[in-house]
Amino acid sequence: MEKEAFIEKMADILEIEDYDDFGIDTRFRDLDEWSSLSGLEMITFFKNELGKEVSESDFRRQQTIGDLYELVR
């Protein structure tokens, strides 16, 4: 998956309305839109759409959208 498409998908999962400040360096856990449900949706997306199994402990170590991208690339 291309980086821009990944960023858009993460913004969609987080229900980000304003993409202007959302990007590869965004610390997703610091966003008001962040929730544990969003995290579950991301992990499910990684498995079902990208075919990547991501453990909860690996997921918890990621801080930015770029970290997630590198994890599932």
Image: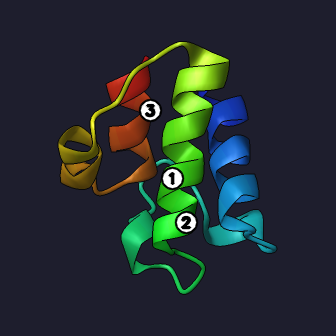
Residue 37's label in the rendered image is 2
Location of residue 7 by image quarter: top right
Q: Amino acid at mark 2?
A: Leu
Looking at the image, which residue is at 60% across and 79% down? 33
Point out the image quarter for the C terminus.
top left
Looking at the image, which residue is at 76% across and 55% down? 12
Looking at the image, which residue is at 72% across and 32% down? 5
- Looking at the image, the residue that sits furthest to the right is 17
Residue matched to label 1: 40
Looking at the image, which residue is at 50% across and 79% down? 31
Of discs 1 and 3, which sits in the foreground? 1
Query: What separation in Å lies between label 1 and label 3 (alpha carbons)?
Result: 16 Å
Residue matched to label 3: 69
Q: Secondary structure at mark 2?
A: helix
Q: Earlier in the sequence, mark 1 or mark 3?
A: 1
Query: What separation in Å lies between label 2 and label 3 (alpha carbons)?
Result: 19 Å
> CB atoms at circles 1 and 2 under 8 Å apart?
yes
Query: What separation in Å lies between label 1 and label 2 (alpha carbons)?
Result: 5 Å
For residue 41, side relative to residue 73 (left or right): right
Establish if 16 lies above or below 58. below
Disc 2 residue crowd, few under 14, some 14–19, many 20+, Cα 10 Å:
few
Closer-to-camera residue (4/32) = 32
